[in-house]
Amino acid sequence: MKTIIIHSQDLSLAQRLSLSLKGELEQRKKHFRIHTSNNFNLTHLRELNKVDLNLISETFNFSEVKLLVSDMDSTLITIETINEIAKVAGMSNEVTEITEQAMLGNLEFTESFKKRVSILNGVNISLFETVFDNHLQLSPGVPELIKSFKSLGIKSAIVSGGLVYFAERLKSQLGLDTFQANNVEINNNCLTGKVLGKVIDASEKANYIYELCELYQLETDQVIAIGDGANDLEMMKIAGISVAYRAKPVLEEKCDIVINYSGLDSVLNFFDYDS
């Protein structure tokens, strides 16, 4: 017997899916569950019904989760911040293309990041504030997810291949516990085009989970990781539960949970938060 979560409150959709799977339908406060012994193709069902469907693991205990580690750009927020800086500065095309190829896994991340920063040489850092205040939006369900995780005693962290400025402000805005992101050189309030220290690539994201687990005295199985691109692959491998949020195919096919239609707060359905 398998249990599918339908991340939706659409009763007619739930009844139709339950009927097609010859399953038993269970209604929760904010979602439905189908218990079925039938075989099915989850990817096909998602695409056919335009709804998020996920299997509940028979072996993983969500009550053991104690740490959320999330990517920032196109995950907690709807934009790629470095692309937005480039747009405001009037030099978007090349930067945006490099970002897209890196997220698809077609370019090595560290070199792609250094290349994008070098293109921004001379850009005034006042544009950071402009982007944060006027262009940055939280992804749907983010405040609800963080607030609920706090109530469940789950710590939260950002690990980003983007810039410290945005990760730090987002940490403060959401009341997160900690963050890690990239430092860039600034001279006379302008970017010099140089990166300071290590670039937060896929392996550094995984390392950050190990560091936080040591800090908080947790096992990696107690971590839930959320991301959208190839740079998140390595941390997904070591986290207890991995979530692909509106993700590139290279990441989506490797994750335990796939969210493409609903908000990030739909992750709470796994915690019986709304049962």
Image: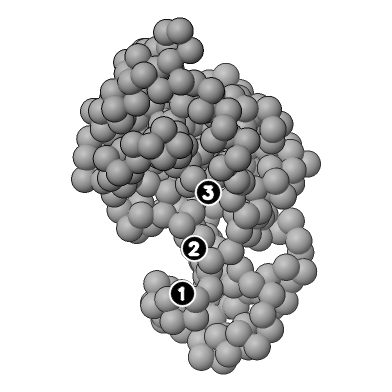
For label 1, the crowd category at 10 Å Cα-Cα, with few meaning under 14, some 14 to 19 and many 20 or more, is: some
Disc 3 crowd, CA 10 A, few/some/many (<14, 14-19, 20+): some
Q: Which of the two discs, 1 and 3, sits closer to the camera?
A: 3
Q: Can see residue 264?
A: yes
Camera-side residue: 56 or 58? 56
In this view, the residue in front, 136 or 189, is 189
Residue at coordinates 34% horizontally, 26% vertically from top-left? Answer: 120
Q: Which of marks 3 and 2 is in front?
A: 3
Which circle marks residue 46 in the picture? Answer: 1
Residue 78 - label: 3
Callout in the foreground (1, 2):
2
Q: In terms of secondary structure, where does tag 1 sit?
A: helix
Q: In the drawing, does residue 217 fall left or right of residue 246?
A: right
Q: Where is residue 180 in the image (x, y as percent from the top left)?
A: 50, 24
> Position of 199 compared to 21: left or right?
left
| Residue underneath mark 2 | 260
Classed neighbour count for the residue bearing mark 2: other residues with Cα under 10 Å, few (<14), some (14–19), many (≥20): some
Going 46% across and 74% down the picture, which residue do you hit? 46
Residue in the picture at 61% in, 58% down: 263
The three-letter amino acid code for the residue at tag 2 is Asn
| Distance between the alpha carbons at the discs numbered 3 and 2 | 13 Å
**103 and 206: which one is in front?**
103
Q: How far apart are marks 1 and 2 (CA)?
A: 9 Å
